[in-house]
Image (cartoon, grey):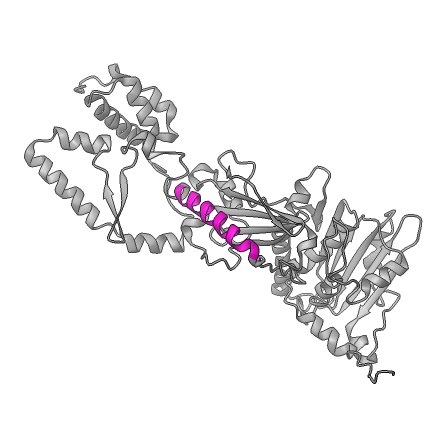
Amino acid sequence: MAEDYEIVAPEPGALIESLRAFGYTPQTAIADLIDNSITAGARNIWVYFTWNGDGSYITVRDDGKGMTSEELVAAMRAGSQNPRTRRGRKDLGRFGLGLKTASFSQCRILTVASKVSGSSITTRRWDLDYVGQTSEWRLLHETASGSEQRISGLKDQEKGTLVLWECMDRIVSDDRVDDQKAERRFLSHISNVEQHLGMVFHRFIDDLQGITIHINGHQISSWDPFLSSESTTQPLQEERLHLHDDVVRVRPYVLPHHSRLSAAAHDRGGGPRGWNTQQGFYIYRNRRLLLAGDWLGLGMRKEEHYKLARIAIDLPNSMDHEWDIDVRKSRARPPGILQEDLRRIARITRERAVDVYRHRGKVLSRKTSGNDIFIWNRELKSGRVKFRINREHPLIADLLQFSVQEDRKRVETLLRLIEETIPVPLITLENSEHPDKEFVPFEGSPPSEMLGILKEVYISLRRSGIPSDEAKERLIALEPFQEFNELVMALRDDEMMGEDL
């Protein structure tokens, strides 16, 4: 018996407008186009922003393998592949929507021109207004009138693909050509796109056999979230978590304290969104960064003292469904079976990051080096934190030991007063509002001032009966003299004339 049914096709104009509302930004939309270029084997990608008022346009051109007319028509079809279909291991797509939804989110006219080796250029165009007027999915065969020159960059290539965005109502609206403020707004997208692409594709850019990306003639640099080239970055043990027949690779990193980085390295390490925001997990699929700096709903908040914790997760593209990867490749949630392991790894990494943050990046152990390294000790009493001046610090101990009874009493009173009046709320507020503006010890101080303090501590160590060589070793371990090894080793007793050693 034949079933009764009706064909209820979506209304083209309404659906295509809905596809514009996926929440892309210009930078995430362009990244989706570059995914297609990489999948097509491109080695070079050129992005151009051209200002022309409301006639401004953007092109993304690559030197990949290109598409035949049949392949181009398939690529322009909304939903060109089933997301559950097994894909090639290096395929960066999933839904068959990226080219269309990313482009429609930014423009009303999408033109794609492509060329395979030995063939001429093939062109197809979606015009959203035309689709709405005709109520049919009419894919046009030529560029819009007057736009032929905008795809001419492909002519001199043996093969490749060029994507052209026109009528970019979400970016330029009705702006006039001579509107300088509008022009600056348009060109400001270049910086955002450059930072985003440098982050998302950093593994491809850093690979000698990878890709180069140019924006308006400028080759962009990669941004490595883990500062792998810095010797003071601490990579922790990689773990392999199994899910079905696939493996998830997890590699935590504890980044250097800012006192261990040059000013330029520290600025760059903050990434597009700043140090505090960039902490958390970084999810990669086929080397492409999907999600940057997120604790994945595992019950952990982004806080200042965890900002040095970053964790790389590498997924195969067969796990998209289990990780709930969305069309924009901007959301991921770990499957329940992996959450406890990821939470454990995150806790360990965050604890190590706190140690580095509090101790200014020094690899120190109180158990092996004694309790005289730090001026301040952190104490926990009745669940509340207090900070006390360390009485075992050589300079403090020397001051208390060799002072007369009355002076010792006054020194102790002063120390207690300092401890009880630390402006913790003000420090916390300043640190939260300006987390990267903490002073490095002796920053801006004349060398003679630092050297004078160094000598005083050395004298204190020597007066306590510690031999010269051992005193210097302890000085090098003392905060904040770790950075001044040469000055410490140059100290000599015969230069302390007049001092009672």
The residue at 66%/60% (across/down) is 321
* Pick the front one: 304 or 183: 304
Quadrant assignment for the N terminus: bottom right
Taking the view exactly as shown, the residue that stands out farthest to the bottom is 4
The residue at 44%/41% (across/down) is 258
Chief secondary structure of the magenta portion:
helix
The residue at 29%/36% (across/down) is 374
Magenta residue span: 337-355
> Left or right of 283: which side holds 295?
left
Residue 348's place in the image compared with 36, above or below, is: above
Taking the view exactly as shown, the residue that stands out farthest to the top is 494
Res 2 visible: yes
The residue at 78%/79% (across/down) is 11
* Pick the front one: 357 or 94: 94
Residue 390's place in the image compared with 181, above or below, is: above
Residue 399 appears at what percent x and percent y? 16, 31
* Pick the front one: 183 or 360: 360
> Left or right of 291: which side holds 399?
left
Residue 431 appears at what percent x and percent y? 37, 52
> Left or right of 423: which side holds 312?
right
Q: Does the segment drawn in magenta span residue 432?
A: no
> Left or right of 459: which side holds 281?
right
